[in-house]
Image (spheres, rainbow, N blue to C red):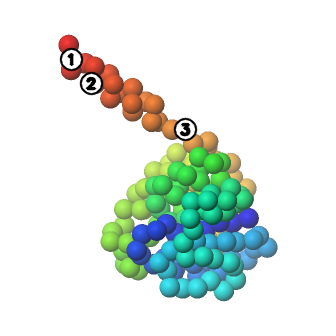
């Protein structure tokens, strides 16, 4: 099952929804389309999901196709999902700048996701199905320890 999530920012991502519509797959697809005005033709969708609905669809999915939002990517990889991330681009009115390119590249460099920079979603889907990605490792504890050492070191 493929779950598509576009986040909740007030930007459309019609380009990605159209690409998903063109996929040649027998897998069930469900999308949370946010503020996009393109309405999918070949799969089920809802504009927005509450937390429980979102969690249920993500849990059911093997593959998550998403924009380059940090929260969406980390949330999916933490749950062991295979992720295809497509950056929102300013030139298409999908965001104010192209920062998602850099974010996606960082996750790709850690071998956590498939970075679909060229928009070839069909190829991305085939690659993801046959690729093993690294397990997500949180660095929150390392950051907290570093802060505690820094704060503790200033008292001396």
Identified at 49% across, 66% down, the residue is: 7
Q: Nearer the viewer, residue 51 or 138?
A: 51
Q: Earlier in the sequence, mark 3 or mark 2?
A: 3
Is residue 15 toward the left or the right of residue 126 in the image?
A: left
Q: Mark 1 = which residue?
A: 155
Element type at mark 2: helix
Q: Earlier in the sequence, mark 1 or mark 3?
A: 3
Q: Is residue 140 above or below residue 121?
A: above
Quarter of the figure that contains the N terminus: bottom right
Q: Mark 3 = which residue?
A: 137
Query: Where does the image place residue 28, in percent across and percent down from the top left?
Result: 75, 71
Outermost residue toward the right?
26
Q: Are marks 1 and 3 in contact (CB under 8 Å)?
A: no
For discs 3 and 2, the disc positioned in front in the rendered view: 2
Query: Where does the image place residue 10, in percent across and percent down from the top left?
Result: 40, 74
Indicate which disc residue 62 carries.
none
The quarter of the displayed image where residue 16 is located: bottom right
Identified at 21% across, 17% down, the residue is: 155
Q: Nearer the viewer, residue 78 or 121?
A: 78
């Amino acid at each position: 099952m493929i779950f598509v999530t576009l986040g909740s920012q007030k930007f459309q991502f019609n380009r990605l929804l159209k690409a998903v519509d063109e996929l040649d797959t027998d897998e069930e697809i469900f999308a949370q389309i946010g503020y996009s005005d393109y309405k999918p033709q070949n799969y089920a969708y809802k504009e927005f999901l509450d937390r429980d609905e979102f969690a249920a669809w993500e849990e059911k999915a093997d593959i998550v196709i998403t924009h380059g939002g940090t929260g969406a990517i980390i949330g999916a990889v933490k749950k062991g999902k295979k992720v295809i991330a497509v950056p929102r681009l300013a030139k298409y009115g999908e965001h104010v700048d192209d920062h998602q390119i850099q974010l996606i590249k960082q996750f790709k460099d850690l071998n956590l996701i498939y970075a679909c920079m060229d928009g070839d979603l069909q190829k991305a889907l085939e690659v993801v199905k046959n690729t093993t990605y690294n397990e997500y490792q949180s660095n929150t504890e390392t950051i907290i320890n570093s802060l505690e050492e820094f704060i503790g070191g200033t008292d001396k």
